[in-house]
Image (cartoon, rainbow, N blue to C red):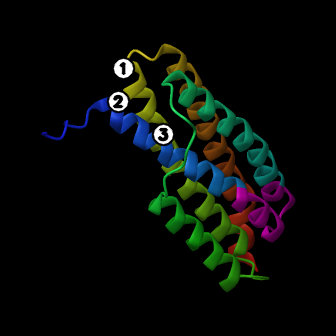
């Protein structure tokens, strides 16, 4: 029997599993980044995003329910690579004035990955007529954009100057 071609709904499900894995990995990584951060603004941003990430995982579980699938992650090599880079920065720059700048760069790489994934999933959900999923994915997309803007603000107002001045 011929193998059925994969359709958009299959790609949506696979990508949903990818971002579910990524969010769980991010949830585990954020406390380490918060602990490593040197400035209070950055520590607070990581703590706030940890709470948001917990809610984002719950939203993803609702999207899985909408498509009648069990929530499951699929190893996301991209997020593993980005978080490994973050761990490397924490090691190599520990105690350095440039540590927070490196942590911010790693965090923004994560945010940009998430923005890309959530934007794509939202567009596919629209195409598939999954109105409730669109709303859930859009909420998270907007949070990720806000977090990215917050991180940029911290970098530009405090962290980059401290990294250079010290």
Determine if the magenta segment contains residue 31.
yes
Seen from the viewer's position, the closer of residues 162 and 32 is 32
What is the chief secondary structure element of the magenta stretch? helix
Query: Residue 2's x, y, as percent?
Result: 12, 40
Residue with the most extreme bottom position: 92
How far separated are the C-alphas under marks 2 and 1? 7 Å
The answer to which image quadrant residue 116 occupies is top left
Seen from the viewer's position, the closer of residues 91 and 133 is 133
Numbered label attached to residue 16? 3
How far separated are the C-alphas under marks 1 and 3? 14 Å
Q: What element carries label 1?
A: loop
Determine if the magenta segment contains residue 29.
yes
Numbered label attached to residue 116? none
Labelled pair 2, 1 in contact (Cβ < 8 Å)? yes
State whether residue 146 is above or below residue 82: above
Instruction: Write the start and end of the magenta stretch as one range.
Output: 28-43
Residue with the most extreme left position: 2
Q: How many labels does the image show?
A: 3
Numbered label attached to residue 128? 1
How far separated are the C-alphas under marks 2 and 3? 10 Å
State whether residue 24 is above or below residue 29: above
Query: Residue 136's x, y, as percent?
Result: 59, 24
Q: Would residue 32 be found to the left or right of residue 72 on screen? A: right
Numbered label attached to residue 9? 2
Residue with the most extreme front position: 1
Pick whichever of labels 1 and 3 is earlier in the sequence.
3
Instruction: Mark 2 vs mark 1: give the one in front.
Output: 2
Pick whichever of labels 2 and 3 is earlier in the sequence.
2
Query: Residue 92's x, y, as percent?
Result: 66, 85
């Amino acid at each position: 029997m011929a193998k059925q071609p994969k359709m958009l709904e299959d790609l949506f499900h696979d990508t949903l599993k990818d971002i579910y894995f990524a969010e769980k990995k991010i949830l585990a990584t954020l406390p380490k980044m918060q602990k490593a951060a040197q400035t209070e603004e950055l520590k607070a941003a990581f703590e706030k995003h940890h709470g948001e990430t917990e809610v984002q995982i719950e939203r993803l579980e609702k999207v899985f329910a909408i498509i009648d699938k069990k929530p499951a992650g699929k190893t996301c090599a991209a997020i593993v690579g980005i978080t490994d880079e973050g761990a490397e920065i924490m090691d190599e720059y520990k105690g350095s004035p440039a540590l927070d700048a490196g942590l911010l760069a790693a965090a923004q790489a994560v945010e940009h990955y998430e923005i890309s994934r959530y934007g794509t999933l939202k567009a596919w959900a629209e195409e598939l007529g999954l109105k409730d999923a669109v709303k859930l994915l859009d909420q998270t997309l907007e949070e990720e954009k806000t977090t990215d803007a917050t991180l940029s603000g911290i970098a530009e107002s405090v962290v980059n100057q401290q990294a250079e001045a010290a």
